[in-house]
Amino acid sequence: MKRIVLIDGENLVYGLRHMLGKSSSKAPRSAVENFNFRGLIEEILADNIPSEILWFGARLRLYNQSSELRRKSSDAIKAQAKFMNQIQLQKINFIKVGYLRARESDPCEKCSHQTWKLAEKGVDVGLAVRMVSEANKAIEIVVISADTDLLPAFIASKKLGANLMHIGYESQPIYALTKASDITRVVTLPLVQKYKSK
């Protein structure tokens, strides 16, 4: 049976940072720099079935509405290029879908100053489309995400005959995705610590 692993990239990064953080705060993004994602995935799968691994992330572009936004979007582009190189060295393909949306924050109550925030949009849709397009009776689709927006794609892929494995996070179990899958496995803190760069 063919196997494909689909990773909701920012969702996984958020999950890892959440697990590595202290109390209610996430660990900084630097905590997952040089993380051994392939090692983590291979240990969770615990077999030698060849797997194509796809990491889904946003298409980025430079925004020029303000100097702050230009700096933030430029930094994001540089960080993504570095991260893509790291991912590809682990034989994980980086798939660009969706986009990075820029929006102003709510005004500060004291000074009315607004800052720009960047957020990925449409990445889950790109992953869902790929999931359904791959679905058939001869494939196992492994999805790493805690995004319930993917539930319709799980249901559709199951109807098309695919064998589904959901990999979630022990800190954020998602019952709906677990119920829609044939198998569920969990990323645990000891595993995250094992594959985190020392």
Image (cartoon, rainbow, N blue to C red):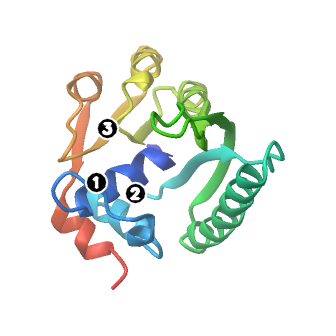
Residue displayed at 54% across by 32% down: 107
Residue 188: x percent and y percent? 19, 57
Q: CA distance from mark 3 to mark 1?
A: 19 Å
Q: Which residue is mark 3?
A: 166
Q: CA distance from mark 1 to mark 2?
A: 30 Å
90 w.r.t. 121: above or below: below
Q: Residue furthest right?
A: 64
Which image quarter holds the N terminus? Answer: top left
Q: Nearer the viewer, mark 2 or mark 3?
A: 3
Residue 101: x percent and y percent? 66, 36
Q: Residues within 10 Å of mark 2 (few under 14, many from 20)?
A: few
Q: Secondary structure at mark 2?
A: loop
Compared across the picture, whether 69 is left or right of 27 comes to right
Locate residue 154: give its quadrant: top left
Q: Which residue is mark 1?
A: 18
Mark 1–mark 2 CB contact (< 8 Å): no
Residue displayed at 41% across by 40% down: 143
Sequence-wise first label, 3 or 1: 1
Q: CA distance from mark 2 to mark 3?
A: 16 Å
The tag on residue 73 is none
The tag on residue 49 is 2
| Residue type at numbered disc 3 | His
Sequence-wise first label, 1 or 2: 1
Residue 135: x percent and y percent? 52, 27
| Residue type at numbered disc 2 | Ile
Along the line of sight, the residue nearer the viewer: 51 or 149: 149
Mark 2–mark 3 CB contact (< 8 Å): no
Residue displayed at 24% across by 75% down: 194
